[in-house]
Image (cartoon, rainbow, N blue to C red):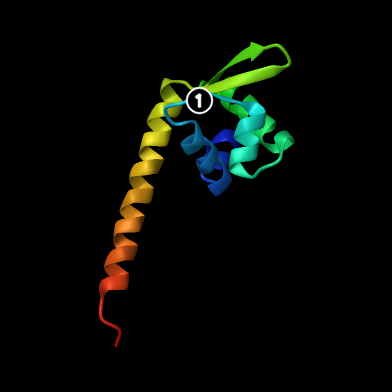
Amino acid sequence: MQTSRRLLHEKTVKLLLALKGRELYLTSLARESGLTYAYVAGIISDFEKEGIVSTKKEGRERRISLAEKGDRLSFSFQEILNLLREEQKKEEMKPQQ
């Protein structure tokens, strides 16, 4: 249940979208997302247990990529964001009353 709630947080969506179609070191993912290493490491650990991401240990670092489940989630979140942006553009185009 904890992971389900966590998936709906903006920071988590940001991480999933950052990994879409690529593989990153944990430190790079934290830096790119503007989140702390500890926070990202905790989320990634939970997501690995849930089958959302996969990790490969390389020396002292871990490379992270989306698993199939993570790919589907990131695609869905991207679609939602696209719809929201379209709606926002429509609202901005409406004449002010």
Three-letter residue code for mark 1: Ile
Q: Residue at x 50, y 25 (%)?
A: 52
In the rendered image, the vertical position of residue 30 relative to residue 22, given as above or below: below
Residue 65: x %, y % from top left: 51, 22
Around disc 1, counting alpha carbons within 10 Å, would you say few (fewer than 14), some (14 to 19), or many (20 or more)? many
Q: Residue at x 46, y 20 (%)?
A: 67
Residue 12: x %, y % from top left: 55, 41
Q: Residue furthest bottom?
A: 97
- Name the element at disc 1: loop
Residue 30: x %, y % from top left: 64, 36
Q: Nearer the viewer, residue 85 or 31?
A: 31
Q: Residue at x 56, y 22 (%)?
A: 64
**Residue tagged 1:** 52
Q: Quadrant of residue 61?
A: top right
Q: Is residue 72 left or right of residue 1?
A: left
**Quadrant location, the N terminus:** top right
In the rendered image, the vertical position of residue 64 relative to residue 42, given as above or below: above
Residue 85: x %, y % from top left: 35, 57
Q: Quadrant of residue 88?
A: bottom left
